[in-house]
């Protein structure tokens, strides 16, 4: 989900169409967390008592559940090029927002700092920034994955992907019989998505060369399918949660076609690139173990429980947008601070850092 560690291109040549996708994906992260993380998943009673509300919630989830897969696919689309400096910058970004969250708690919710502060700051808990830990592991393994990509024939590459996703489909999704796949919250799932995007970029198949409007139609069709399927399942008191797993075949397919849609037009925008370089900050803000549940989730849940549905939506949309852009602006402070620190590190290059900041 990082905005500054995924491309082997110079920042000044970033493709704004794909940077726009990065922004869209991060906004979808905030939406999906405002839905079934902050709010209870509608069950049998809710569906029958208020079907329109339940249907809207299922549709919101069906529109936004692709976000995590999109970020990993974006990494694979360009390929990760392992550099110690980039890894250090990512670690600094995570710690910066951890300290920021601690500061917010110190001012508004000091009781949140009564236990495990250092453990949570350094992500030692199971639920502390799970994506960061999975992505760092992917980053560390990227040289090995890239070596395979460079050496494997198209047939070998396709066989590895086919067998991996067949295994994941059976044991991770259909029967949920492997804990280490955990619905897609895992390194193996990230590896599969990374390799899938590398294959899509390096070995384009005819089915991926359709009109971008066909790609968009496929994505919207999957959204409709997931929405209706979940609604019907819950009408009959079924579970249905696996439909919104990151490893659900339809979710992966939807993320693929959304990626393809954005890849098939091109433009350059300094504003889009400037915003996208800090997109990851929005995740770090509203998923912090210090402030995510206490502020982001709780505020949305309070509105859901106490306000009419139209007013709830009226409050939520600007709130999510404010968190999104506010996080990006806070990250600009982090970037400026990192540029100062970067000068003093062994790899520091003042002119290169100056050019980097100018081209964001």
Image (spheres, helix red, strand yellow):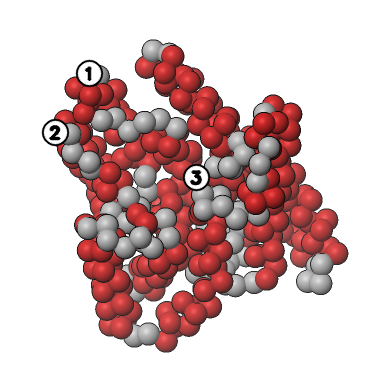
**Residue 340 at least partly seen:** yes
Q: Nearer the viewer, mark 2 or mark 3?
A: 2
Q: Badge 3: how crowded within 10 Å, few (<14), some, or many (20+)?
A: many
Residue at position x 82%, y 67% in the image: 345
Q: Read off the residue under disc 2.
A: 236
Q: CA separation, marks 2 and 3?
A: 33 Å
**Figure quadrant of residue 136:** bottom right
* Percent x, y of residue 252: 31, 56
* Percent x, y of residue 27: 48, 40
Q: Nearer the viewer, residue 26 or 135?
A: 135
Q: Badge 1: how crowded within 10 Å, few (<14), some, or many (20+)?
A: few
* Percent x, y of residue 148: 43, 82
Q: CA separation, marks 1 and 3?
A: 33 Å
Q: Read off the residue under disc 3.
A: 26
Q: CA separation, marks 1 and 2?
A: 13 Å
Q: Nearer the viewer, residue 113 or 187?
A: 113
Mark closer to the chain start, 1 or 3: 3
């Amino acid at each position: 989900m990082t905005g500054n560690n995924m491309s082997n291109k110079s920042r000044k040549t970033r493709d704004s169409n794909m940077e726009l996708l990065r922004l869209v994906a991060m906004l979808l992260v905030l939406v999906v967390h405002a839905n079934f993380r902050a709010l209870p998943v509608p069950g049998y009673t809710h569906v029958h008592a208020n079907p329109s509300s339940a249907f809207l919630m299922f549709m919101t989830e069906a529109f936004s559940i692709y976000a995590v897969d999109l970020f990993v696919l974006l990494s694979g689309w360009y390929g990760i090029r392992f550099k110690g400096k980039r890894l250090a910058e990512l670690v600094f970004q995570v710690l910066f927002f951890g300290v920021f969250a601690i500061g917010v708690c110190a001012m508004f919710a000091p009781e949140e700092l009564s236990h495990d502060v250092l453990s949570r700051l350094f992500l030692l808990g199971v639920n502390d920034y799970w994506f960061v830990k999975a992505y760092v592991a992917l980053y560390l393994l990227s040289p090995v994955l890239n070596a395979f990509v460079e050496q494997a024939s198209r047939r070998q590459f396709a066989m590895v992907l086919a067998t991996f996703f067949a295994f994941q489909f059976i044991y991770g999704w259909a029967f949920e019989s492997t804990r280490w796949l955990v619905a897609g919250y895992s390194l193996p799932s990230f590896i599969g998505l990374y390799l899938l995007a590398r294959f899509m970029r390096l070995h384009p198949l005819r089915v991926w060369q359709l009109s971008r409007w066909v790609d968009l139609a496929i994505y919207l069709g999957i959204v409709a399918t997931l929405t209706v399927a979940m609604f019907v399942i819950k009408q009959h008191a079924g579970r249905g949660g696996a439909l919104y797993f990151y490893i659900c075949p339809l979710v992966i397919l939807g993320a693929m076609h959304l990626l393809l849609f954005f890849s098939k037009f091109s433009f350059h925008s300094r504003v889009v690139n400037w915003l996208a370089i800090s997109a990851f900050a929005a995740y770090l803000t509203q998923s912090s173990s210090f402030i995510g549940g206490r502020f982001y989730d709780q505020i949305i849940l309070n509105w859901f429980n106490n306000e009419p549905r139209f007013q709830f939506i009226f409050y939520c949309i600007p709130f999510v947008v404010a968190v999104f852009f506010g996080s990006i602006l806070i990250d600009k402070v982090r970037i400026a601070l990192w540029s100062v620190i970067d000068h003093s590190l062994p790899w520091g290059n003042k002119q290169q850092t100056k050019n980097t900041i100018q081209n964001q």
